[in-house]
Image: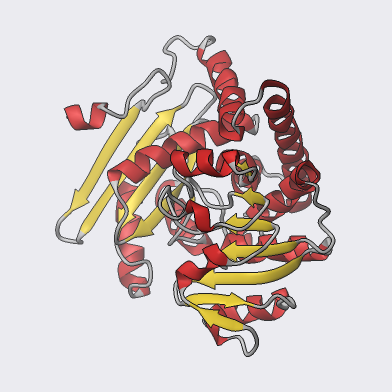
Amino acid sequence: MEDTFRFGDELGPAKVVQVGEPALGLRAVLVVDNVARGPSIGGLRMAPDVSVDECFRLARAMTLKNSAAGLPHGGGKSVLWGDPKMPRERKERLIRAFAHALRHEDDYIFGPDMGTDETCMAWVKDEIGRAVGLPAALGGIPLDEVGATGWGLASCAEVAAPHCGLGLRGARVAVQGFGAVGRHAARFLAEQGAVLVAASDTAGTLADPRGIDVDALGALKHAGGSVCDHPRGDKRGPDAILDVECDIWIPAARPDVVREDNAARLRAKLVLQGANIPFTPGAEKMLHERGVLIIPDFIANAGGVICAALEYRGATQSAAFDAIAEKIRGNTAAMLDAVKARGLLPRTAAVELAVARVKSAMALRRFNIL
């Protein structure tokens, strides 16, 4: 118990729930960090190597993300141990059992995350009635299909790029993790004239300074292939994406991919954090001192949760995309103004913005974070 409380501070977490069902092989954890602004929204992450520590950190990222975006929701996260590529029947049993165990946890609304998708959210909705990122057949806005997070990253780039002396037309983009988030970010940036020069997945890295056809690569991935199955370009190991010379680098996969031991390899001017907690704090500081502008995760990649929150209230996709662009452009500009005026690290400025909004809500509650 003491080990769990080591994560606590003035913002949370409010609640930690461990779920186990040995007969199914179910092991899962929910962290509800702070619900001062309203019930928490956060994704269900499924992977063999998730951890309680990761769940705590991601739940806090969701508190900051939802607050910064001005949403009437707090932050939470759930993790489920298992291979997301397991047979569909077993995956469905695990997710339905986890949802059933949390049927009375009204402070948490499930959303999709790494290893889960809109079909998984349909199972949750069927079990307990609380889920976002649903299939269109259930009245949802399928986040992975429409690319809400990628749209937000492109909106962020529009504001951040000029601060690096960049225009988007002709800007060279590298995407670490060419999946649901990364491929849509590349697509929306390409529509503004940017050029994809590298992309990676778990199988390797594809690099081509002449440019990569984003639509063709997206179709290849959708068909179940790897970026390394593309007929053109140089094929390298997954980690080689760090070494590609580019203007904009987008991490869109796992946490802590850039650390103090490899940050010096990054060759970009602007980083848009499409994944949650993809850099360690030390790596962000090192790169900031080198002049690399890093837009933190909970500012840059909030498009998905903004879309999810609006879906929960019955909004259309077009209304959600308008809100994503407005909120992310506004928050990016406010953060960068603070960075310039006060000489702050971008993450420090972003945290100050988000925490101030959380604390304003906490001050109006009988119990601050509950």
Q: Residue furthest bottom?
A: 231
Residue 293 position, x and y percent, is: 65, 43
Q: Residue at x 67, y 44 (%)?
A: 314
**Above or below, 111 relative to 74:** below
Task: Give the colouring mode of the picture.
Answer: secondary structure
Q: In this rendering, would 201 be left or right of 24?
A: right
Residue 340 position, x and y percent, is: 72, 28
Q: Residue at x 61, y 34 (%)?
A: 346
Can residue 19 be seen here? The reply is yes
Q: In this rendering, would 291 be left or right of 364?
A: right
Between residues 147 and 272, which one lies in front from this camera angle?
A: 272
**Above or below, 277 relative to 40:** below
**Above or below, 111 relative to 203:** above
Rendered-image quadrant of the C terminus: top left
Q: Residue at x 52, y 38 (%)?
A: 285
**Above or below, 43 relative to 241:** above
Rendered-image quadrant of the N terminus: top left
Residue 157 position, x and y percent, is: 74, 49
> In the rendered picture of this protein, how many numbered marks are placed on residues?
0
Can residue 72 be seen here? The reply is no
Between residues 250 and 10, which one lies in front from this camera angle?
A: 250
Between residues 362 and 301, which one lies in front from this camera angle?
A: 301
Q: Residue furthest left?
A: 22
Q: In this rendering, would 39 be left or right of 138?
A: left
Between residues 324 and 196, which one lies in front from this camera angle?
A: 196
Quarter of the figure with residue 108: top left
Residue 268 position, x and y percent, is: 64, 55
Q: Residue at x 40, y 17 (%)?
A: 10
Q: In this rendering, would 349 be left or right of 226?
A: right
